[in-house]
Amino acid sequence: MSEYPVVPVILSGGSGTRLWPMSRELYPKQFIALLGGESLFERTLRRVRGIEAIQSPIVVCNEEHRFMAAEQLRRSGVREGSILLEPVGRNTAPAIAVAALEAVERHGDAVLLVLPADHMIRDEDAFRAAAQTGARAAGAGWLVTFGVVPTRPETGFGYIRRGEPLEEGLYRVERFVEKPDADTAQRYLEQGGYYWNSGMFLFLASRYLHELAGHEPEMAACCRAAFEGRHRDLDFVRLEAASFERAPADSIDYAVMERTDRAVVVPLDAGWSDVGSWHALWEARDHDADGNVLVGDVIAEQTRNSYVHAAGRLVATLGLEDVVVVETADAVMVAPRARSQEVKRIVERLKAAGRDEARVHRKVYRPWGAYETLDLAERFQVKHITVEPGQSLSLQLHHHRSEHWIVVRGTARVTLRGETLLLGENESVYIPLGAEHRLENPGKIPLELIEVQSGSYLGEDDIVRLEDRYGREAKQAPDRSGEERRTVDATR
């Protein structure tokens, strides 16, 4: 094993548009329990346990996902991990660079085990064995990539051509190959010696920084400046935005791996999937006797080789084959399974039309809990709000709406115009327009309440935040009634 500590670097910046409508911009696939039980992010954290010399992880994610990452780290029992926040997306090479700088700061030097947060691996023991082989090579100065042993002529992945062996289970990389056409992919499968490019890596933090500075000096300098200008905000490390935004955007493959003479590949045969589409998810899950994957309340009659997901209501299918049907509270998507990679085109149309279904679910997660829109019409909105034990919303007010809260479970501590009220089940309170208020859960079970809003404008940006325990930055509200503009935030 390597003499260096091994630090998992979890890259969690993706939005998973091909898994819409389950995956949304503000609640992407890595944080969803698509395989049942744990989310893909939590599975990634669990997968590294048992690797020798393993340390607490470094997570790189964007601003809008920070509280989900923190909560799932906590739920996984991780107490000492770092969460680095990217001001903007700059692809994997800069993300790994700032993680390498954090690892050097924390450990002096370390082997980085770089893992996307949204992959599935069935045989975790095989993964750990490959990781330990790779960690030894990384400690000796090699840049290691995991090459997935192909099981079919796949055109959706790049490939790695292996060269001469260095030792058992470790080969030099002869070359990286772009995504092939179907005939070329079939030839790769028959010829052997080609692996799918998994996007997982092992190398010394110092070695990666040295290689990046040699091949992409501007990127390396911008990342270093962004890291040196960082500041800590609660559980998060905020990079200096201007420097990071100046960094050229590129993947680790193009910036470093295809240009270094130190690249080696460890073959990985462990039931790997990037869960990159509904077809991939159908392949990854167990099938029934008809070849179906059925999730939720589903009745499938004369349906074969299909993926049917019911999130909130009964979904019934009849006489279908090779299709994907996904139902959520606010959308239903139906497509041929073979064309599930094209779902991102729907997301592009939703974004172009300015529709919220591309960004959020009706259920929206916040650092204090979640809220779900139950009904919405002109001048009124009804929400189901859940506040986790010990958590609280910001002290806030609204210019354009009043609210009525009815407690249905737990105990609510309500601050209203400087006075404090305790409400139990079946008790309620009225929050007048313009009144300063806060909602807290002082109990040991989740607080659930129904919120009825009424007013001339019900948008989430009509929130003037006065105090906030989560350090969330405020924005400027649109001026909707000739009033003075106030500092607000749309995340309660």
Image: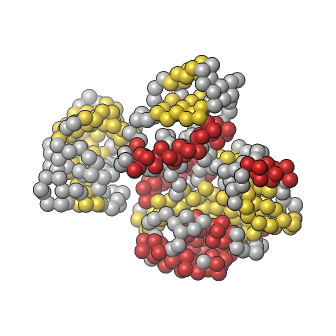
Q: Is the residue 163 above or below the residue 456 in the image?
A: below
* Side (left or right) of 447 relative to 420: right
Taking the image as drawn, is residue 225 in sight?
yes
Q: Residue at x 76, y 60 (%)?
A: 160
The chosen color scheme is secondary structure
Q: Can you give x and y, in whole percent of width and height, for residue 255 in the image? A: 63, 71
Q: Can you give x and y, in whole percent of width and height, for residue 291 in the image? A: 68, 28
Depth order, front residue of 231/422: 231
Depth order, front residue of 270/185: 185
Residue projecting furthest to the left: 482
Marks counted in the figure total: 0
Q: Residue at x 66, y 58 (%)?
A: 199
Q: Residue at x 52, y 33 (%)?
A: 334
Taking the image as drawn, is residue 369 in sight?
no
* Side (left or right) of 208 relative to 426: right
Depth order, front residue of 45/413: 45
Q: Quadrant of the N terminus?
A: bottom right
Q: Can you give x and y, in whole percent of width and height, for residue 359 in the image? A: 41, 48
Q: Is the residue 169 above or below the residue 99 in the image?
A: above
- Residue 94 location, quadrant: bottom right
Q: Residue at x 33, y 37 (%)?
A: 373
Q: Is the residue 388 above or below the residue 375 in the image?
A: below
Q: Can you give x and y, in whole percent of width and height, for residue 105 in the image? A: 57, 74
* Side (left or right) of 398 relative to 216: left
Depth order, front residue of 487/213: 213
